[in-house]
Image (cartoon, rainbow, N blue to C red):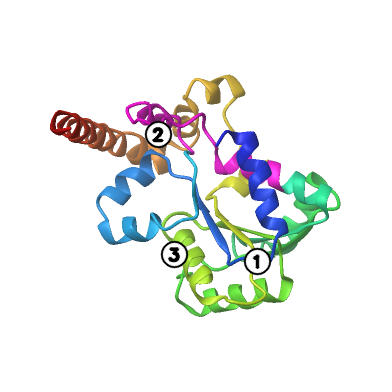
């Protein structure tokens, strides 16, 4: 889907409570490399209801396939557009993420950034695990709030495992839509600055993030990047072999 198509479709899904919860993931280069080394997690990840390419290198790589992706659909952009859509449609959101004890501060930030948006927030500790007691608490709070959309901002793979657990266990009063979106809330509320639009369009947002947080992200964008190239070459050889056989 294009971004506009994805946004409208997800708003329609969020408005309908007559189906099981649906999970959205947004893979980038780091995700692809980590999934390649974790077959069991890759199997679970592939059961997501929607998989949108968050990174331009993933969109570029899709050009090797018979069905290339039309464009990039990022978690950060979906967070903003879906929040605005929820205001227009009088729908609510729930956020799992943020630093412990930040709930009140984040609620104020949401009120300033998205007036009239109905928001509930749970900020777990750094020890959060998808199958632990804090996850139990998060699920109970989501069920009480009955939001249309749950944004899970815990980082991979915690956010995905939590989303899959929720989808697996909740059979009534479920939230229709769960998005695993990492740092999207921080960008949406202005706590972190995204790359200029021109850098996003030419696929250089990764460089902006690396320059902004070099100590935290250098390995992701250097070591992981080289591994990603290796995965692409392997995939290309596999596709060429298939074409020769056919």
Q: Residues within 10 Å of mark 2 (few under 14, many from 20)?
A: many
Identify the image quadrant of residue 98: bottom right
The numbered dot on residue 161 is 3
According to the picture, the residue beneath numbered tag 1 turns out to be 101
Q: Nearer the viewer, mark 1 or mark 3?
A: 3
Q: Secondary structure at mark 1?
A: loop
In the image, which disc is placed on residue 187? Answer: none
Classify the position of the C terminus by image quarter. Answer: top left
C-beta proximity under 8 Å, tags 1 and 2: no
**Cα distance, mark 1 to mark 2?**
36 Å
Residue 139 within the magenta-colored segment of the rendering: no
Instruction: State yes or no: discs 1 and 3 in contact (Cβ < 8 Å).
Output: no
Q: Which mark is residue 58?
A: 2
Residue 197 at x, y percent in the picture: 61, 24
Mark toward the start of the polypeptide (1 vs 3)? 1
Task: Tell me residue 133's x, y (percent).
Answer: 51, 80
**Which is more N-terminal, label 2 or label 3?**
2
Residue occupying image coordinates x 51% and y 76%: 169
> Magenta part of the protein: which range?
54-82
- The picture quadrant where one finds residue 195 is top right
């Amino acid at each position: 889907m294009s971004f506009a198509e994805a946004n409208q479709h997800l708003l329609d899904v969020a408005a309908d409570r007559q189906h099981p919860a649906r999970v959205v993931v947004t893979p980038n280069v780091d995700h692809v490399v980590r999934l390649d080394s974790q077959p069991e997690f890759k199997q679970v990840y592939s059961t997501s209801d929607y998989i949108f390419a968050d990174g331009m290198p993933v969109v570029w790589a899709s050009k090797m396939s018979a069905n290339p992706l039309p464009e990039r659909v990022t978690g950060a952009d979906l967070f903003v557009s879906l929040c605005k859509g929820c205001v227009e449609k009088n729908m609510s959101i729930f956020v799992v993420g943020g630093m412990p004890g930040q709930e009140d501060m984040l609620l104020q930030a949401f009120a300033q950034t998205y007036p009239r948006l109905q928001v509930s927030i749970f900020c777990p500790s750094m020890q959060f695990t998808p199958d632990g007691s804090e996850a139990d608490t998060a699920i109970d709070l989501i069920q009480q709030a009955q939001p249309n959309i749950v944004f899970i901002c815990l980082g991979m793979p915690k956010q995905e495992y939590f989303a899959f657990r929720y989808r697996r266990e909740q059979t009534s009063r479920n939230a229709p839509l769960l998005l695993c979106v990492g740092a999207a809330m921080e960008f949406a509320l202005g706590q972190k600055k995204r790359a200029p639009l021109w850098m996003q369009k030419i696929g250089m947002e990764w460089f902006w993030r690396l320059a902004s947080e070099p100590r935290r992200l250098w390995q992701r964008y250097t070591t992981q990047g080289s591994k990603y190239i290796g995965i692409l070459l392997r995939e290309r050889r596999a596709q060429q072999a298939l074409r020769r056989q056919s």
